[in-house]
Amino acid sequence: MFLKYLENTCSRQEMEEFFAYIKKAKTDEELRSLIKKVYEEIKLSHPSLTYVDEDGKLVFSESAGETNITSLKKTGKNRYVRAFALAASIIIVAGIIWVGSTPAKHNKITAVETLTKKFTERKEQKYLLLPDSTQVWLNAASSLQFPDEFKSDKREVYLTGEAFFDVKHADKIPFLIHTRNITTTVLGTAFNIKAYNDQKEIMVSVTRGKVKVSRDNKLIAVLTKGRAVKIGNDTLQITEKEVAVENISAWQHGNLVYDDTPLEDIVKDLQNVFNTEIRIEDTVVSRSNVTTSFSRDIGAEKAVNILGRLVNKKVVSEKGTLIIK
C-alpha cells in the first residue's frame, strides 16, 4: 500500500486506509524503515534532490550542476518528474508520521529543521563558511550537513569523511560534530576529523584549543594542541597520542602524511585523492600499519609503488587498476 501511494495508484478507499495505518503508533517503526529504504534509492540516482533523512530532518542537497540536469533529462521526462514526486511524497509521509508519533501534550505545529548538505567527489576539496562564520575545509569524497541557522544553545553538524574545522568562538554555545556514534564538542578551536565509513579508524587531531570526544555520549578523550585520538570504527580500541601540528592539516596543502596507519586505509585514501582504483591482494598485508608521506603531485602510480616497497610487494597495473600483490 505504501508503494501504491508513492506511485499515485491508490484508490480513495486505499488512501484512507493507508493514512489510518499511519496514525497507529504500532506501525511507526515499519513506516520509518520503508521511508528510509525509498529515499536511499532516490539519493543514489538523484543526489541533488531534497529528501528527509531517517531522523525526520529535511535535507537540501547542493545542486549537482548542469551535467546532472542534462543526464536526468536524457532519462526521460516521466522518470525525472517521478523522482521529484517520490521525494515530495516521502516528505509528506514523514511529516505525518512525526506528528502522529508525538505525544498529545506536545503535539504542536513546530518548524521543521532543515539541513543543507555539501559534498565533494573524489579528487575534490571544498571550502565552506557556516552560518556562524566557522570555516570548514572538506576533503575528497566527504559530506557535511548543517542547518541554515544554528540554534541558540548549540551548533550541530554531521560529517562523513574528512574535514578541517576552524570553529568560531561562542561562549556557552558549543559546536558539535557528529560522525556516526562519535561526537566532537568544542567552543572555539581548530582541529581535523577523519571519519570515512569504509575505513578502520576515526581520528580527531587538534591544532589549537581544546576538544572533547565522546562515543555513544560517553567521554573518551579531552584533546589539546598537538594531541590526537584514534578510535576503531568497528572495535572498542582507543589510542591517544602526540602528533606534529604541521601534519594535521597537511592534506590541505597537497601533502599526504600517514603515521602507523593500516595499509588498507591508506589505499582507500589514495583512491579518493587520485580517483584511481587500487587493490591489495594479500589480506594480511592489507592490515599492516605503515608510516609514510608523499606529495599528491607525484600521482597515484608513484604513490602506490612507494607503498609496495614499504611492504615488500610488487605493484602491477591491470585494466586501469593498480594492484599490490
Image (cartoon, helix red, strand yellow):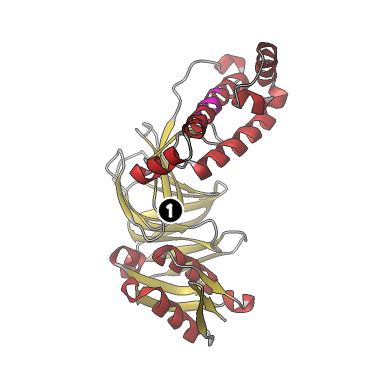
Question: Can see residue 191?
Answer: yes
Q: Is residue 214 above or below residue 224?
A: above
Q: Is residue 308 above or below residue 2?
A: below
Image x and y of residue 206, in percent = 37, 60
Q: Which residue range is magenta in the image?
A: 87-92
Residue at 55% x, 46% y is: 217
Tag 1 secondary structure: loop
Q: Quadrant of the C terminus?
A: bottom right
Name the image quarter holding residue 48. Answer: top left
Q: Nearer the viewer, residue 286 or 318?
A: 318
Amino acid tagged 1? Ser
Residue at the right extreme of this rendering: 26
Image x and y of residue 5, in percent = 63, 23
Question: Can see residue 244?
Answer: no
Q: Quadrant of the N terminus?
A: top right
Q: What residue did someone put label 1 on?
A: 142
